[in-house]
Image (cartoon, rainbow, N blue to C red):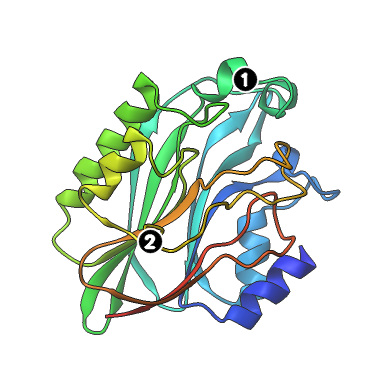
């Protein structure tokens, strides 16, 4: 956690999009009595919004979801529900025991709206339906279709950061790329799962993306190989 906070402070981002943000019993680190969203917001001194919709069985205080942080005051929030499911046990959510339910668990798109440069901007976080290995399924395509429909109906600039749980050549990612600019295309980046710490290592996949509206020009895109997660962070510098 200290390394993550230090990394984010050094990058000094205007916006951060996060997935798998947890509270209490879902926390993988020692402290089971804290909200990661509240902890990170306090340590980063940023505005933020969080939506936790996956719940731990028998513990209503423990949730799992998406977050957006930023330097700009958040003036609006919308949650686009993509899938609803029952509460899970830790064993079911565990990477080794839950393949039969992971594609079915709660999923959503979180849209945080700010006023920047005198206009409304949408900063979003999405965690795509999970499959192993990453592949198109009727469920991944259905959820991607909902996200694409939402994006194409926005009338102001947007940035979407996501762990889409799917590869660039998939129809799932292609569905989003039809309505948004996929910054990973042509970047030369081939992997965003951590090369040594992800459970599939030494194999690796590109499954994390930044999509934008056509209001932005990409100046820099990096995927630094640091250990703050089992995924690598995707860092973009954009110009309006």
Q: Quadrant of residue 39?
A: bottom right
31 relative to 123, above or below: above
Residue 206 at what x, y percent from top left? Answer: 52, 48
Picture coordinates of residue 195, whole percent (x, y): 71, 51
Q: Residue furthest right?
A: 30
What residue sits 66% from the left and 23% below the top?
Answer: 57
Rendered view: 192 above or below 117: above
Q: Is residue 238 left or right of residue 233?
A: left
**Cβ atoms at labels 1 and 2 below 8 Å apart:** no
Tag shown at residue 68: none
Left or right of residue 187, residue 229 in this image: right
Residue at 26% across, 36% down: 146
Residue ranking furthest to the top: 100
- Real-space Cα distance between discs 1 and 2? 32 Å
Q: Nearer the viewer, mark 1 or mark 2?
A: 2
Residue 177 percent location from the top left of the image? 27, 49
Is 226 on the left or on the right of 147, as rendered? right
In the depicted view, which residue is nearer to us: 234 or 81? 234
Instruction: Identify the mark nearer the N-term, 1 or 2.
Output: 1
Whether residue 218 is situated above or below residue 98 in the rendered picture: below
Q: Residue at x 49, y 21 (%)?
A: 104
Judge whether 126 appears above or below 165 on screen.
below
Instruction: Please identify the quarter of the rendering in which residue 55 is found.
Output: top right
Residue 136 rendering spot, x and y as whole percentages: 40, 27
Instruction: Provide the residue designation for mark 2.
Output: 186
Q: Quadrant of the C terminus?
A: bottom left
Which residue bears the numbered disc 1?
99
Residue shown at 74% from the left, 44% from the top: 27
Specify whether 141 is left or right of 231: left
**Frontmost residue, 195 versus 141:** 195
């Amino acid at each position: 956690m200290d390394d993550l906070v230090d990394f984010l402070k050094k990058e000094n981002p205007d916006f951060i999009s996060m997935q798998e943000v947890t509270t209490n019993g879902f926390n993988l680190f020692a402290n089971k009595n804290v909200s990661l969203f509240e902890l990170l917001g306090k340590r980063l001194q940023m505005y933020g919004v969080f939506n936790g919709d996956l719940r731990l069985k028998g513990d209503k205080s423990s949730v799992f979801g998406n977050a957006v942080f930023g330097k700009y005051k958040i003036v609006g929030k919308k949650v686009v529900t993509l899938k609803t499911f029952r509460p899970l046990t830790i064993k079911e959510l565990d990477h080794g025991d839950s393949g039969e339910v992971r594609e079915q668990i709660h999923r959503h798109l979180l849209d945080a709206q700010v006023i920047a440069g005198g206009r409304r901007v949408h900063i979003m976080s999405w965690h795509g339906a999970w499959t192993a290995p990453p592949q198109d399924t009727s469920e991944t395509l259905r959820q991607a279709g909902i996200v694409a429909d939402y994006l194409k109906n926005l009338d102001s600039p947007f940035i979407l950061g996501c762990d889409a749980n799917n590869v660039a050549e998939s129809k799932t990612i292609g569905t989003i790329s039809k309505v948004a600019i996929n910054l990973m295309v042509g970047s030369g980046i081939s992997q965003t799962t951590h090369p040594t710490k992800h459970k599939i290592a030494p194999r690796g996949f590109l499954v994390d993306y930044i999509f934008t509206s056509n209001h932005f020009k990409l100046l820099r895109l990096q995927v630094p190989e640091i250990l703050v997660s089992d995924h690598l962070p995707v860092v973009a510098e954009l110009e309006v």
